[in-house]
């Protein structure tokens, strides 16, 4: 496994381009299973999760090629059974269930594996498909689903901590080929869901209300091939904005959507970060004194759980107490113990982390536990004087395209090495 060696204490300066969204592209790739025709997806980030989804789609019979950010896909013939050894390794692969069932009338997909940041059950996915007249049973670790033709219905997808994003994607994709009208209440409103809707509409789907809690899908007999460009990754943009602020740097982020980051940018302004937004660019300016802030993660349009760890790293620079409350996942503070190895003072009280910032930090060897925790450790390493080694950065390769290269282009001293 690889590690990052970071020589910290240097401000980041320069320009970088934000890649296409990981969280948007995976369901979009799954949606290509809904047609026999060729689909071309552009601005696809070069990530291990993307290539892993490619393996899953190939195992189902699809032709999948990736070249310079463009994926070409065609699924003329489909296998209805997903490969256990592939699907169990990536939770996002559950989004193949809806498209497989809608097109083939049957699907057998292995239950996705566990996750270090907490339980993410698929009960709402199954509830929605049952509402569309699918017969579902779970046996020997597989979800087995069948339906003559799915039937439109009213589906409520609100859960314990809000709407389910992947569940909304799954039901939405299945409903495009269902007979009649499907109404999804308490649908997820994330930009990634809206992006999926735009791709499905380009394929010939009839969808109204994407991006709102009430979505109406009128089923059609068939979908055709289409081309689509994936939206910019809002979490990658948030990560680099916080890294720039944490190092008192001057960084311009290009090809991004500030409207997708309203809650994050509002909190950064409250923290004293100076910035200028112009069109599809955001410039983080040096010189702002970082203030302690409190935040609770929420479903979109609230502060995203995927940016919580990175904000915690930034708050190490703020004198005073900050409180970050995690409302989405119950085990998403594993980075706190690793940040403590760098000198952080963080107390966990139930769903809240209390950060006493402004303390001296120093480089150390730390271990990444998940994708966003990895990003937080990198930001902290960039802040710290001395050398920080972040181990298990394969997590980063799942969701950040060429992070070490982008950071080096901004003047950071970051080197990828094999773990000892």
Image: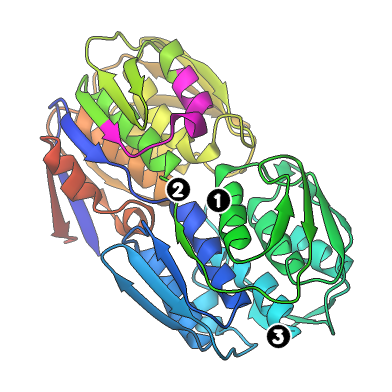
Residue 28: % across, % down: 53, 63
Q: Quadrant of the C terminus?
A: bottom left
SS at badge 1: helix
Residue on which disc 2 sits:
231
Identified at 76% across, 65% down, the residue is 175
Between 37 and 29, the residue placed more toward the observer is 37
| Mark sitting on residue 104 | 3
Residue 196: % across, % down: 58, 56
SS at badge 2: loop
Q: Is residue 358 left or right of residue 387?
A: right
Q: Point out the tag, 1 or 3, that comes first from the N-terminus.
A: 3
Residue on which disc 1 sits:
195
Q: Is residue 190 visible?
A: yes
Between 270 and 116, the residue placed more toward the observer is 270
Q: Is residue 394 above or below residue 250?
A: below
Q: Point out the tag, 1 or 2, that comes first from the N-terminus.
A: 1
């Amino acid at each position: 496994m690889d590690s990052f060696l970071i020589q910290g204490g240097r401000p980041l300066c320069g320009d970088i381009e934000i890649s296409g969204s990981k969280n948007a592209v995976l369901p979009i790739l799954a949606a290509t299973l809904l047609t026999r025709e060729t689909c071309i997806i552009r601005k696809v980030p070069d990530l291990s999760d993307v290539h892993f989804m490619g393996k899953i789609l190939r195992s189902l019979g699809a032709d999948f090629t990736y070249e310079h950010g463009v994926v070409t896909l065609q699924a003329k013939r489909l296998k209805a059974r997903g490969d256990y050894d592939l699907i169990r390794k990536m939770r996002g692969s559950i989004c193949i269930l809806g498209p497989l069932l809608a097109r083939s009338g049957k699907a057998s997909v292995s239950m996705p594996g566990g996750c270090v940041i907490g339980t993410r059950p698929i009960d709402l996915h199954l509830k929605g498909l049952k509402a569309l007249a699918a017969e579902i049973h779970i046996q020997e670790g597989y979800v087995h689903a069948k339906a003559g033709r799915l039937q439109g219905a009213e589906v409520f997808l609100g859960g314990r901590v809000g709407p389910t994003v992947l569940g909304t994607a799954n039901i939405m994709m299945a409903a495009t080929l269902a007979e009649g009208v499907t109404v999804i209440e308490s649908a997820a409103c994330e930009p990634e869901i809206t992006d999926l809707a735009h791709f499905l509409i380009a394929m010939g789907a009839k969808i109204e209300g994407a991006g709102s809690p009430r979505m109406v899908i009128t089923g059609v007999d068939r979908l055709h091939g289409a081309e689509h460009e994936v939206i910019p990754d809002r979490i990658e943009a948030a990560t680099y904005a916080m890294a720039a602020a944490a190092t008192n740097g001057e960084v311009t982020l290009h090809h991004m959507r500030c409207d997708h980051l309203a809650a994050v940018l509002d909190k950064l302004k409250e923290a004293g970060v100076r910035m200028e937004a112009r069109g599809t660019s955001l410039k983080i300016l040096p010189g702002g004194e970082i203030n302690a802030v409190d935040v609770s993660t929420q479903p979109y349009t609230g502060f995203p759980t995927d940016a919580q760890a990175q904000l915690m790293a930034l708050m190490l620079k703020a004198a005073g107490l900050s409180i970050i409350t995690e409302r989405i996942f119950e085990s998403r503070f594993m980075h706190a113990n690793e940040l403590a190895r760098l000198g952080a003072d963080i107390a966990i009280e139930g769903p809240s982390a209390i950060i006493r910032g402004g303390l001296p930090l120093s480089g150390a060897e730390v271990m990444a536990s998940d994708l966003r925790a990895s990003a937080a450790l990198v930001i902290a390493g960039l802040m710290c004087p001395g050398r920080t080694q972040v181990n298990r950065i394969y997590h980063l390769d799942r969701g950040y395209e060429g992070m070490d290269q982008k950071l080096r282009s901004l003047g950071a001293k970051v080197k990828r090495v094999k773990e000892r």
